[in-house]
């Protein structure tokens, strides 16, 4: 018999204690136990995620270095300049094109 259950038994056998105090102590004890279990589960889940991510990183065989993890090539600076002008220019010009279309619409 552990200390907590022994304490609860002593409390329940005491003639001066009301049943509401006993039930609130049991609820408090249960909440402490559940919190400890939840914390242990969170720690175990965190460890499992960490093991998976480190193994996934270790098993990947991608090229490393600057510009190797981008979805476009940075080797040719003139091609990169043209792609950036198209990308950012289209986003900048879109509202002006929409306004012109609305003005010319009858």
Image: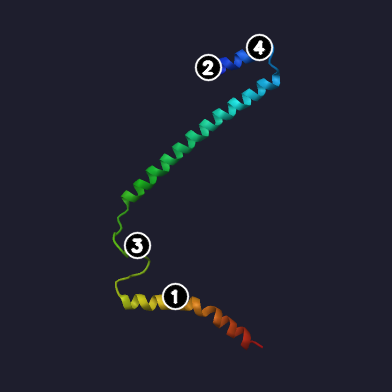
Whether residues under marks 4 and 2 lie with C-beta atoms below 8 angstroms apart, the answer is no
Crowding near the residue tagged with mark 4, few <14, some 14–19, many ≥20 C-alpha atoms within 10 Å? few
* Left or right, 47 with reference to 75: right
Residue found farthest to the front: 16
Residue mark closest to the camera, 1 vs 4: 4
Of mark 3 and mark 1, the one earlier in the sequence is 3
Of mark 4 and mark 2, the one earlier in the sequence is 2
Q: Where is residue 4 shown, x and y percent of the image?
A: 55, 19
Label 2 sits on residue: 3
Q: Residue at x 38, y 79 (%)?
A: 82
Q: Is residue 3 above or below residue 44?
A: above
- Label 3 and label 4: CA atoms lie apart by 70 Å
Please state which of residues 54 and 92 is positioned toward the viewer in this rendering.
Answer: 92
Label 3 sits on residue: 69
Label 4 sits on residue: 14
Of mark 2 and mark 1, the one earlier in the sequence is 2
- Label 2 and label 3: CA atoms lie apart by 58 Å
Label 1 sits on residue: 87
- Based on the displayed image, in which of its 4 quarters is residue 25 positioned? top right
Q: How many marks?
A: 4
Residue mark closest to the camera, 2 vs 3: 2
Whether residues under marks 3 and 1 lie with C-beta atoms below 8 angstroms apart, the answer is no
- Label 3 and label 1: CA atoms lie apart by 19 Å
């Amino acid at each position: 018999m552990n200390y907590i259950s022994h304490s609860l038994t002593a409390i329940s056998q005491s003639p001066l204690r009301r049943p509401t105090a006993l039930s609130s102590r049991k609820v408090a004890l249960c909440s402490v136990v559940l919190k400890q279990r939840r914390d242990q589960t969170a720690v175990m889940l965190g460890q499992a995620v960490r093991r998976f991510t480190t193994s996934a990183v270790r098993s990947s065989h991608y090229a490393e270095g600057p510009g190797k993890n981008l979805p476009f090539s940075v080797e040719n600076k003139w091609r990169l300049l043209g792609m950036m002008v198209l990308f950012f220019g289209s986003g900048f010009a879109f509202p002006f094109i929409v306004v012109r279309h609305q003005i010319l619409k009858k």
